[in-house]
């Protein structure tokens, strides 16, 4: 069975997250290391970090990922915000490494009307500078940039934009987290096997499939091309079960970890995470829906 899990809360302390993931029978997990809507990051004590590393090592979790805060804007035309975002990104990587987590997922931000080219240049400058920091050079930290739904002036809604951002950066340290809801909302219709195939071919052509290292498996509340980032329960959104099955079984994605960021509220009388994880496990273990008689 491939690595599968969801984003779990760190309420009560980061050390509580792994137990929550194991209660859901997850083999993959994603966490924040602090409140994601605040710049302040409470320091992780050496004892907390050590205990987390030890628990992670002895757990059933095979893949652990840290998601950066929501406030980062690596494409900002405002020098102060850009500098603050760059420092925060370095700190996020250092915190992940202290917990024994090698992969960090980040949103890229928005060019705020200054132009996509200038925004991409600023993102690249931040990522290139990150490579010079001790948090990067002295560790095996890996940064995964997440595709966006393309709302407003957000950077990274197309594979071509992501290719320009990652060009020349080492492929073993910089990759893509493919968010299926974001891709669908950005205009890549994932509701059919043909649509999934078209998107995969576009990624291969623009980026190379080796850049995809993680999948955020989320249904989309809104139609393809809406540019609205609203995640939905698996099979209840505009991608639907046929599209989800095609994504899960596509050979280019078949060995990649799947992490759900679906709604937490109960659905059909069942806890949201329990329902969505159970459904995805069933899809993984069965034939693709499009191939069934």
Image (cartoon, rainbow, N blue to C red):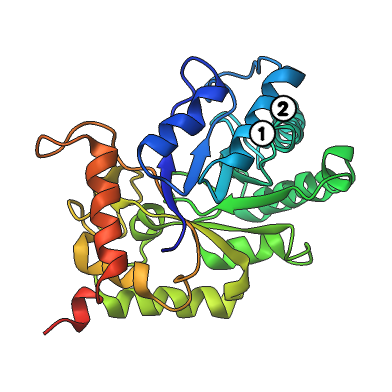
Taking depth in this image into account, of 54 and 204 the one nearest to the observer is: 54
How many marks are shown on the rendered structure? Answer: 2
**Can you see residue 275?**
yes
- In the picture, measured across the screen, residue 85 lies left or right of residue 182, that is right
Which residue sits at x=65%, y=15%?
40
Q: Position of residue 241 (x, y in %)?
A: 20, 63
Relative side of 250 to 288, left or right: right
| 91 to the left or right of 283 | right
Rendering coords of residue 165 (x, y %): 68, 59
Q: CA distance from mark 2 to mark 1?
A: 6 Å
* Front position in the image: 201 or 15: 15
**Rendering coords of residue 72 (x, y %):** 62, 33
- Quarter-of-image position of residue 177: bottom right
Image: 75 above or below 281: above
* Callout 1 secondary element: helix
Residue that label 2 marks: 50
User: In the rendered image, which residue does mark 1 sit on?
Assistant: 54
Neighbours of disc 1 within 10 Å: few (<14), some (14-19), many (20+): few
Quarter of the image that includes the C terminus = bottom left
- Asked whether the beta carbons under mark 2 and mark 1 sit within 8 Å of each other, the answer is yes
**Residue 152 sits in quarter:** top left
| Residue drawn at (36%, 63%) of the image | 187
SS at circle 2 = helix
Which residue is pictured at 39% across the width and 79% down the height? 198
Position of 73 relative to 164 (above/below): above
Q: Quadrant of the N terminus?
A: bottom left
Please, is residue 254 above or below residue 29 in the view? below
The x and y percentages for residue 83 are 77, 30
Label 2 Cα neighbours within 10 Å, binned few <14 / some 14-19 / many ≥20 = some
């Amino acid at each position: 069975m491939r690595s599968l899990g969801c984003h779990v809360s760190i309420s009560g302390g980061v050390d509580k997250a792994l137990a929550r993931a194991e209660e859901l029978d997850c083999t993959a997990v994603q966490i924040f290391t602090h409140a994601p809507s605040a710049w302040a990051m409470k320091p992780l004590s050496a004892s907390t970090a050590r205990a987390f590393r030890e628990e992670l090592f002895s757990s059933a979790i095979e893949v652990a990922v840290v998601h950066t805060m929501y406030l980062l804007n690596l494409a900002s035309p405002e020098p102060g915000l850009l500098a603050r975002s760059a420092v925060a990104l370095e700190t996020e990587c250092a915190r992940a490494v202290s917990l024994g987590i090698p992969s960090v997922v980040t949103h890229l931000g928005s060019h705020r009307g200054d132009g996509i080219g200038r925004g991409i240049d600023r993102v690249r400058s931040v990522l290139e500078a990150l490579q010079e920091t001790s948090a990067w050079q002295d560790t095996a930290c890996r940064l995964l940039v997440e595709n966006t739904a393309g709302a407003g002036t957000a950077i990274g809604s197309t594979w071509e934009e992501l290719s320009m951002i990652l060009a020349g950066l080492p492929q073993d340290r910089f990759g893509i987290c493919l968010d299926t809801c974001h891709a669908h909302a950005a205009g890549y219709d994932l509701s059919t096997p043909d649509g999934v195939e078209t998107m995969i071919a576009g990624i291969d052509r623009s980026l190379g499939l080796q850049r995809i290292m993680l999948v955020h498996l989320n249904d989309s509340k809104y139609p393809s091309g809406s540019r609205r980032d609203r995640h939905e329960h698996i099979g209840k959104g505009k991608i639907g079960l046929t599209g989800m099955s095609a994504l899960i079984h596509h050979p280019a994605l078949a060995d990649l970890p799947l992490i759900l960021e679906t709604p937490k509220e109960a659905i059909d009388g069942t806890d949201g995470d329990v329902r969505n994880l159970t459904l995805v496990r069933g899809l993984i273990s069965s034939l693709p829906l499009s191939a069934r008689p």
